[in-house]
Amino acid sequence: MKDIFISSSPHIHTPEDISWIMRQVIYALVPGALIGIYFFGIPALMVIAVAVTSCVVIEAISQKALGQKITIKDGSAALTGLLLAMNLPSGAPWWLVVLGSLIAIVLGKQVYGGLGNNPFNPALVARVFLLISFPVQMTTWPQPRSFFAPAADTVTGATPLGALKTAIFEHKSITAAPDINIMDPFLGNIGGSLGEISALALILGGVYLILRRIITWHIPVVYIATVAAFTGLLWLINPGIYADPAFHMIAGGLMLGAFFMATDMVTTPITNKGKVIFAIGCGLITVIIRIWGGYPEGVSFAILIMNAFVPLINRFTKPQKFGAV
Amino acid sequence: MMSSILLIGGIGCVAALILGISSVTFAVKMDPREKAVLDQLPGANCGACGMAGCAAFAHELTVNDQAEMTCPAVNEEALAVISEVLGRSLGGGTSVVACVCCKGSPAETVDRYNYIGPKDCRSAQIIAGGAKGCGFGCLGLGTCVDVCPFSAMYMGEDGLPHVIIERCTGCGKCVEVCPRGIIKLIDKTGNYSVGCISKDTAKVMKQLCKVGCIKCGLCVDICPFEAITVSKDNAALIDQNRCRSCGLCVGVCPTGVITPMRKPEKVSIIAERCKGCAICEQICPVNAISGEIKKPFVVDDSRCIGCGMCIEKCPTDAIERIRS
Amino acid sequence: MYYVLLIVSAALVNNFVLSRFLGICPFMGVSKNIDTAVGMSMAVIFVMTLATFVTWLINGYLLDPLGLQYLQTIAFILVIASLVQLVEMIIQRVSPPLYQALGIFLPLITTNCAVLGVALLNIQLKYSLLDACIFAIGAALGFGLALVIFAGMREDFELNNIPVAFKGTPIALITAGILSLAFMGFSGLVK
Amino acid sequence: MRNVYRKVPDRCHRKDSLMKTFKGGIHPNDKKELVEDNPIAALPLSDHYYVLTQQHIGAPAKPIVKPGDEVKKAQAITEPLGFVSAASHSPTSGRVKEIIQRVHPVTGLLAPCIVIESDGKDEYMPGLPLERDPFSLQKDELIGIIKSSGIVGMGGATFPTHVKLSPPKDKKIDTFIVNGAECEPYLASDYRLMLEEPQRIIDGARIVMRILGVDKAIIGIEDNKPDAIKKMKEIAPPEVQVEVLKVKYPQGAEKQLINALTGRDVPSGGLPMDVGAVVQNTGTCAAIWDACANGIPLIERITSITGRGIKHPKNLRLRVGTPVKDVFEFCGGVVDAAKIIFGGPMMGIAQFTDEIPIMKGTSGILLLTEDDTNLSTYSACISCGRCVEACPMGLIPSDLSKQGEKGMWEKAVGTNLLDCVECGSCTFVCPANRPIVHFVKFLKSLQRAASAKAKGA
């Protein structure tokens, strides 16, 4: 019987495979990306297009070079590209985006053996690499404008967190920072990376992922709650030099990080208990960097550092086996 | 200047004193021979010796007087040094190489089904007993190649593993992992091997594999040295001690299951020494030597099978082995 | 608070391995297994603190008064080497398995630039004896932290399918690079 | 593929919180609608029957007939070698034709098999079937009857039943559980038995209660069989309690079933008797009744022939040894099946030929088409943790699968390899399609080989 197949049990399988999961995450990112395109115009669209294309192409080339099966169809490269784009300023020049894709796919993923073997979130590796290597390009933030406004009108300015840091650095007080209407970062009308500006759109996407059971609530909720609690405590101690927790929750890359970067399955702990520990770590490091560090934003660093802790966390959060005495 | 010398010297003295004291207090016996032995071992930590690695083996060799030299990869020089260090003579390393005893490439055999699962022969074997129709046939997933610590095996284009004899140390790792026991360790000096271990009868074999041993016995009949045995339910087997590598069996085997393991050796006649006695011409089983009496004889390379019978009989030592 | 900052600074911001790139040899060599890494970290904490203590005394009470600062390096190496010998003997006696596991890297603490680095930095930064010791503990903790998380990751690599070309040291170096990128995030935390 | 995954089958009507269950597990689409409404039918007598000598877990059985011998239906043709072993009986009357080597459905290797040529008369041994009151017999007599009747666990594990019913003196048994969960998708043989012949199950259960000396039995049935639950509740005597279980795989796994019904956890490496419980399948109970009341050994069983790869799915009463070919023919033939599975889709064993006979443990034959099964390759683990969520044993299957890829069985034993029951939940949910169960089987085989070697040395 030549046409008979033999494999080990079980013989049925859920249809939820890797490419399905990747597709769902991409869907969930669409609102955030659309808001970015709305506020930053054609350049944002270009950044997204270049990042996604170059990631897919680079993945195909590097897998070919390493003699592996080409797996661009599973959508993970496209997702990495989209996440990378959403972590870049909309004015990023094309070469910066391509370089970022190269770092993300090759250094972040393929040298480790491809999807599933990488210890660090590839998009974040690229972002941090670019941030440290090209600080000027990576911190030139075009300010939001209407999609229909002419490109020549683009002005650049600081992100809310950047402005805050400057104010504290120069005046030792947050009152020197420009006032921010909390609705702006909620809807996306602020400067920043092109995908992180609208908390609302990102929360929508995140909730979709949780409802679809792609991610669990543990990481996003605990991460955001830790940031809120820690900054809230500091704010209660001295509201003069510490911004309020609502601002910290909504401004910057926290929503993007908490819902999409820190929940990357490959680079986060396996058990829910581990996820909680991971998220608390991310929250603490984020706040420490934001408040006391040299960089205005600490989400990327925090997640990368906690990625490194994942093997240790997994080791100490093993589930109890059935019938353990 | 003086002060600096004094200072450094002073510190040195104090440190030496402390170390001297503690080396007595915290002394742990460590056999210096152990390190000397370890230095001579290959350091591949392959585990073929049966220990957890070269260091563990060195320790075992040193502390246990009965320990045998089970390392297959140690060379003769190193062996001599180790023997000297330990003050006892150790037997040589193994003198065997691995040999894959199946020629049933996918093109020549039938499969029972399509296997889906990990690319590991052992994995494939535990699910329904392996896909290959012949129960003694190579599953072709290359587990032997994967475990070889010396990169002495590779998967050929025919879908079968092959041994690079020059690299093989006879450690037997591949033998251990092969779920069908196809890989055998045979004498290093052997030149021919039978690529089949099937116990199936000719009738069954013909359905399963075009290149298996059908137990016809032709090789047994032609072998001038009685080195081959075969029975109804055992594939032909060459006794490497008796085999003289004449290669006659290769020619008669109807399924081509007997093959040379390496490029066959040939002989050549050293013209200066040859007295032209013609003994070699008479003894040669394949009529590869010819010449005129009292003149140097010549060997026809295309016929010579390298059996070496002529070398033994030559009264003037005028024949030598060459690799063609 | 000052001491907390001192430790944070030594352990995270100016992590010896990940931002000063000192002590890379044991970092690469002893990070294949978490248990060994923990043992190595302990040994380093012990050696670093003790070395700092002794070298500070030697510097403060011998070299400085005698005007022999130029002998710092040599004198320190001498002291550290003896200390490591001592530690080696103690470990061999107290915990043979750990001794086996650390292998060649234990004597290599001798030439561990991190230990010497701490000793020299302390003098450069004009720390008091207490400061110096706390700084050394912080630095050693940072070294241990880097070593242990790195060991955790490398243990996982054992199970992953890393391309042959990158297996072993190459992937470890790449990972260390990314890790040090991540630790750059702490820069500016403490001046 | 798309419709494999469905949260809760339509016919479940209760709130989840009301039903008993265990931690972990999965919800595959149960697909029982293919066959569950077909009443049990009988197959015409076959020309030849092929009785494998190894029909059970444990020591092999030895043939006690020679080629040429005349045999009657229910006559013993093999005798057990050892305590954990079971005899086999002739499924019909006729002549022993030969003893040949046949592909064994469990191992895929050749195994001895007794071929019986039917004489068409289908005559019982003289005196059978008899009528006796099993409740008048002593405990030891009953166990003896069960042993000589060759009864094994009929849910698929085929563990000799008399062994399970003879717990050592120091193990106090207080609960007997009848496993009517039938949590494997597709299969409905237990369901049909519960619906059509519930009295045999109940009476068999009462015999077991007598043997074990317990006064309480629980029948656990999954909520997707409301008719069976109703039927069993109707006829169950007060000492036999019918419990509704949540529809979740592997609800019928011994340890999970005990946990759901009694809240007790069988310790790791232990047996149900360690927590005072004994579990038997419904089919086994019915076989025990036949043996004790009528003297008929285990020579036939109910089997579901189902899946989209068979023309007419059926529930059949099949004699042990019936050639599968005849069964397929009776069901209208095979239509483009990609996999033939003995047992259910989660734990069943794939077969590569139809030259195999029905065995005592064949609860179903499932013929899956290419669309229904999963033939794609696997990729690297993405650490999503779904397997950890699904594992009813609280293990980390992703680690086991990685260790399996590298053959690191020693490490895997430290990752609780030996606690794995190979239920397949992890593999079902794995988005990377990793054959985790296969890896586990592989690691266990390495571990077995190594410990055998260590014992030999």
Image (cartoon, rainbow, N blue to C red):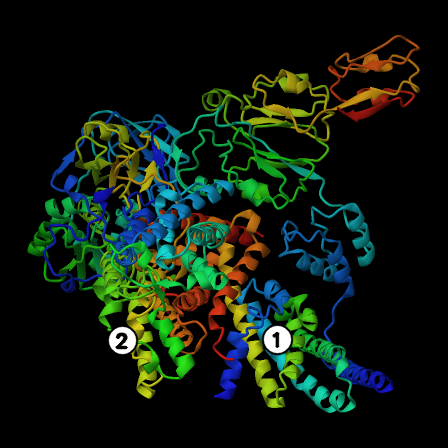
> In the current view of this chain or complex, which residue is farthest to the left?
D234
The reply to whether residue A261 is in sight is yes
Residue D362 occupies quadrant: top left
User: Callout 2, which amino acid?
Assistant: Ala
Q: Is residue B29 left or right of residue C101?
A: right
> In the current view of this chain or complex, which residue is farthest to the top?
B292
- What kind of element bears circle 1? helix
Mark 2 falls within which chain? Answer: A
User: Callout 1, which amino acid?
Assistant: Val
Q: Position of residue A159 (x, y in %)?
A: 35, 69
Q: Which of the numbered marks, if any, corresponds to residue A246?
A: 2
Residue named by callout 1: C44
Up the image or down, C43 lies above or below A119; here it is below
All told, the count of numbered labels is 2
The residue located at (19%, 55%) in the rendering is D247
Q: Are marks 2 and 1 in contact (CB under 8 Å)?
A: no
The residue located at (39%, 29%) in the rendering is D100
The reply to whether residue A315 is in sight is no
